Amino acid sequence: METALDIVSWVLLVTGSVFAMIGGLGLIRLPDVYTRMHGAGITDTMGAGLILAGLMVQGGFSQVTVKLILILIFLLYTSPTSTYALANAAFHRGQKPLLGKPGHGKEDDQPSKP
């Protein structure tokens, strides 16, 4: 039984680490502020949640697990809230979202008038 718990724990830890690394890569590769926040916010929450779940499996039923659950609940509330606040601040500062490739916006899709 202990081996099965170790396998489940390591799968959760590795999967969470992969999500965190994908989020870091998204911060580098995505084109504008809004897509970067979206990529980082989702993978940050999922990655940290899976890592915490893996640690909970390793911790068993103890006071450590209760603390990790409280950290997870706090993370699930604060990460989306902070992403929203950051996007709202960027929008109010005048940062426009990128709606396609530069030079290929909606105004370029209009047929030319003869």
Image: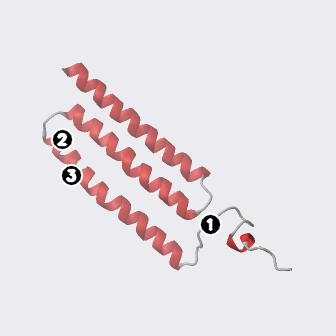
At 19% from the left and 47% from the top, the residue drawn is: 67
Task: Tell me: residue 16, above or below residue 102.
Answer: above
Quick check: 12 left or right of 108?
Answer: left
At 48% from the left and 74% from the top, the residue drawn is: 89
Q: Amino acid at mark 1?
A: Leu
The quarter of the displayed image where residue 10 is located: top left
Nearest to viewer (mark 2 / mark 3): 3
Q: Pointer 2: what residue?
A: 64
Residue 90 has which mark?
none
Q: Which class describes the residues within 10 Å of circle 2: few (<14), some (14-19), or many (20+)? A: some
Residue 70 has which mark?
3
Q: Earlier in the sequence, mark 2 or mark 3?
A: 2
Q: Which class describes the residues within 10 Å of circle 1: few (<14), some (14-19), or many (20+)? A: few
Q: Assign a secondary structure to mark 1.
A: loop
Task: Tell me: residue 35, above or below residue 55.
Answer: below
Task: Tell me: residue 58, above or below residue 19.
Answer: above
Label 3, label 1: how far apart the Cα atoms are: 38 Å
At 13% from the left and 38% from the top, the residue drawn is: 62
Q: Amino acid at mark 3?
A: Leu
Asked if the residue at tag 1 contacts the one at tag 3, i.e. Cβ–Cβ closer than 8 Å, the answer is no
Q: Quadrant of the C terminus?
A: bottom right
Q: Pointer 1: what residue?
A: 99
